[in-house]
Image (tube, grey):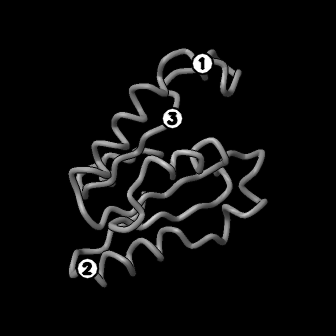
């Protein structure tokens, strides 16, 4: 059904670099100020936590890796899961199973990724 509330209840934070767009115009609100907010959020998560697993999907998100202290966090990168690029590497990237393996290695509960 597409409802991802169960992920949020397990500690998953879904964050797009740009939080709004014009209908049917991907990226239309880039460089309009959202990046300032989302960059600050990423930095805050990085600075105030340890062992966070960041899944950076798409080149725009992957550029945010510079905001993350990779000495204390895990960063996984893959193409964006949009219908235009999902078959170019997102499908098969195994980010969900890799995330669960990293969580288990930290002594934490794995995420139930079922939607």
Identify the residue shown where x is 30% and y is 84%.
105
Measured as percent of width and height from the top left, residue 54 is found at 43, 58
Between 43 and 98, the residue placed more toward the observer is 43
Q: How many other residues sit within 10 Å of disc 2, few (<14), some (14-19) or many (≥20)?
A: few
Between 115 and 88, the residue placed more toward the observer is 88
Quadrant location of the C terminus? bottom left
Q: How many other residues sit within 10 Å of disc 1, few (<14), some (14-19) or many (≥20)?
A: some
Q: How many other residues sit within 10 Å of disc 3, few (<14), some (14-19) or many (≥20)?
A: some
Q: Residue 99 falls in which quadrant of the image?
A: bottom left
Q: Residue 42 falls in which quadrant of the image?
A: top left
Does the CB distance between marks 2 and 1 fall below 8 Å? no
Q: Which residue is mark 1?
A: 29
Q: Which residue is mark 2?
A: 106
Measured as percent of width and height from the top left, residue 84 is found at 78, 45
14 sits to left or right of 108: right
Between 50 and 8, the residue placed more toward the observer is 50
Does the CB distance between marks 3 and 1 fall below 8 Å? no
SS category of the residue bearing label 3 = loop
Question: Label 2, label 1: how many angstroms apart (C-alpha)?
Answer: 37 Å
Measured as percent of width and height from the top left, residue 65 is found at 51, 52
């Amino acid at each position: 059904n597409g409802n991802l509330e169960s992920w949020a209840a397990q500690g998953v934070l879904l964050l797009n670099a740009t939080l709004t767009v014009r209908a049917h115009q991907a990226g239309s609100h880039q460089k309009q100020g959202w990046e300032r907010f989302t960059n600050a959020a990423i930095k805050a998560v990085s600075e105030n936590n340890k062992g966070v697993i960041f899944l950076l999907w798409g080149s725009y998100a992957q550029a945010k890796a510079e905001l993350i202290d990779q000495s204390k966090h895990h960063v996984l990168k893959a193409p964006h899961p949009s219908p235009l690029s999902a078959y170019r590497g997102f499908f098969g990237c195994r980010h969900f199973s890799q995330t669960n393996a990293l969580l288990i290695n930290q002594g934490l509960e794995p995420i139930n990724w079922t939607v």
